[in-house]
Image (tube, coloured by chain):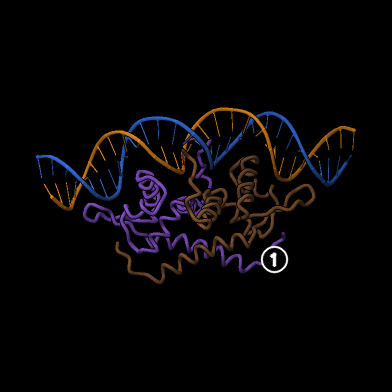
Chain colours: A brown, B purple, C orange, D blue
Amino acid sequence: MGVTKTEHYTDKQNSNALLIRALAHPARIAIIEYLIKVDSCICSDIVGELPLSQPTVSQHLKELKTAGIIKGNIEGNSICYCLDEKVMGKLIAYFTSISNQLEKKKNSCC
Amino acid sequence: MGVTKTEHYTDKQNSNALLIRALAHPARIAIIEYLIKVDSCICSDIVGELPLSQPTVSQHLKELKTAGIIKGNIEGNSICYCLDEKVMGKLIAYFTSISNQLEKKKNSCC
DNA sequence: TTTGTATATTGCAATATTACGATTAATAAA
DNA sequence: TTTATTAATCGTAATATTGCAATATACAAA
């Protein structure tokens, strides 16, 4: 039905899924990589960097913003977007914890 | 149009997006967390663990398998699924590299 | 005020995802 | 061989995502 049964998973599983989903598109990966590279930016830069129209880029930015991964501050008549390192840190911490768990038990069956 | 313009991104961006997308659902997060916890399992176990029907679980397993995150070996008349730590490692390495880049430049503008 | 620039929103079409019942396929057990 | 068990596949419905043209909004500059 295209609708996820979120109520049966843990809060962590749901919130991590939302964060991960926000990065599950090459355009949004390109956006955060660009934000990391320039370490501050305005939206029109991003439109120029991507092979997408301005409305489509705006939509991807909105998804990243909704997920909390980026934040935007109005600056004159443009908008300064940058990473929310705290939220990004949560995602990184999740994968780090998986990494640690995998380190511990190397006795896989396959 | 619901179709991603993959040809304009780098191979890394596209392949990372595919890996990340494979985990962009709480059911699939629950599956890999369960696989890590038990360190080997068969599909029927997973069906019991999740609030989803057997066909739906099978479909999620297929997506994880297509992405390369898990592998399955036939074992009697059931299937032993487990993580492909090499592929999982690539994903972890990506987030680690992002983490390292963020460490270096703390002078964000927002 | 008018004009230009930057970004968001709306509306829509094409396609993808999520979920499940019914069925199939393959092996195990009786 | 028959029956049971396990997992995959098919078909389909509901919903979500991706993308863009057109338009709206908001501010800056002239």
Chain to which the residue tagged by mark 1 belongs: B
Q: Where is residue B66 in the image (x, y as percent from the top left)?
A: 38, 49
Q: How crowded is mark 1: few (under 14 residues within 10 Å), some or many (20 or more)?
A: few
Left or right position of A48 against D16: right
Q: Where residue B34 sits in the image (x, y, percent)?
A: 40, 59
Residue under the point 57% across and 50% down: A28
- Amino acid on which the number 1 mark rests in the picture: Asn
Q: Which of C14 and D30 is in front in this view?
A: C14
Identify the residue position indicated by label 1 in the image.
B107
User: In this view, which residue lies farthest toward the bottom?
Assistant: A104
Q: Is residue A100 above or below residue A51?
A: below
For the point 57% across and 52% down, which residue is it?
A30
- Pinpoint residue D9: horizontal percent, then vertical percent: 31, 39
Quadrant in which residue B37 is drawn: bottom left
User: How many numbered discs, if any?
Assistant: 1
Residue at left offset 65%, top offset 49%:
A46
- Classify the position of the C terminus of chain B by image quarter: bottom right
Query: On the rendered structure, is B104 left or right of B37?
Result: right
> Which residue is nearer to you in this view: A54 or B35?
B35
